[in-house]
Image (spheres, rainbow, N blue to C red):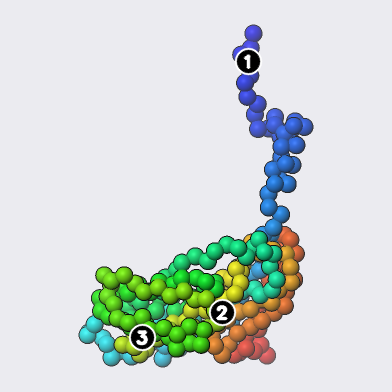
Amino acid sequence: MPPRVCCVTISEILTSKVGLGVALLITSLAPARGQAVVEGRVPLPKPQANALPPPRYAGQIGEIAPPDPATAVVYLEGKFPASWTNTPPATTNMLQRGLQFHPALLPVRVGTAVSFPNEDDFYHNVFSYSKVKRFDLGRYRKVDKPAVQVFDKPGVVKLFCEIHQHMRGVILVLDTPYFTQTSTNGVFKLENVPAGRYHLKAWVSESVSYQKEIELKDGETLQVSFEDKENPAT
Ligand SMILES: [Cu+2]
């Protein structure tokens, strides 16, 4: 007598009617959302020689790192289903490292708490006079607990250091859960977006930004390219 079979193989399940039912059930339980993708490229400014900081601090207080290369923030504006917008914003960091802000451009969602650790062996004094957020963090060291600010209004927050005048940083506070940052060659991919009509925006700097109206369908991957405003195609 053959041994009793206590289990069936997966192929048996998949070929049986019961298995088919199970498979269909799993499919229907999967969230019917988050299917669309937007991807493309944003023209970025070419790196400039004068982007390097002055050598004024060389040999005095440490190596000056080159500033982060330019990137853009790409985001969607529009009406999102409520269930998509409830995820609480995460806490994130804006470092002072090598006499630079790192990252140089930080996108966050409204309500995000940003910590400002000082990773250098000397003082920084980060401040901003921006309309959406004014603050002065004062001086503290690597070993000190970093200051934290909550960014509760959308807009551009320009960061400076009172001690090192070449230091520049931006926190872009966004009122949308759908945003991403390009690579340094401008490529972006925004995934898990619900179908709908949106304004697709790309923020490069206070003087350069792009916008396109898009419509996303479930399952679609939409390719979007922005024409370079600085060097328009001839
Ligand atoms: Cu500084």
Residue 161's disc number: 3
Secondary structure of the residue carrying tag 2 is loop
Query: Left or right: where does residue 119 sit relative to residue 195?
Result: left
Label 3 within 8 A of ligand 1 by Cβ: yes
Residue 53 visible within the image: no
- The residue at 43%/75% (across/down) is 149
Q: Which residue is mark 2?
A: 154
The amino acid at mark 3 is Cys
Q: Which residue is the extreme one toward the right?
A: 17
Q: Of residues 87 and 38, which is closer to you in this image?
A: 87
User: Splitting the image into 4 quarters, where does residue 223 fall?
Assistant: bottom right
Q: Which residue is mark 1?
A: 4
Q: Find residue 59 and report its horizontal and vertical position in percent.
A: 22, 84
Measured in 3D between alpha carbons, the distance from the residue under mark 1 to the one under mark 2, in whole angstroms, is 66 Å
The amino acid at mark 1 is Arg
Q: Find residue 103 and report its horizontal and vertical position in percent.
A: 43, 75
Q: Find residue 98 and report its horizontal and vertical position in percent.
A: 32, 78
- The residue at 52%/84% (across/down) is 132
CB under 8 Å between callouts 1 and 2?
A: no
For label 2, count other residues whose C-alpha is less than 10 Å away and answer few (under 14), some (14-19) or many (20+): some
Q: Is residue 223 above or below residue 155?
A: above
Measured in 3D between alpha carbons, the distance from the residue under mark 3 to the one under mark 1, in whole angstroms, is 76 Å
Secondary structure of the residue carrying tag 3 is strand
State which quarter of the image contains the N terminus: top right
Which tag is nearer the camera, tag 2 or tag 3? 2
Closer to the chain start, of discs 1 and 2, is: 1
CB under 8 Å between callouts 2 and 3?
A: no
Query: Left or right: where does residue 26 sit relative to residue 61?
Result: right
For label 1, count other residues whose C-alpha is less than 10 Å away and answer few (under 14), some (14-19) or many (20+): few
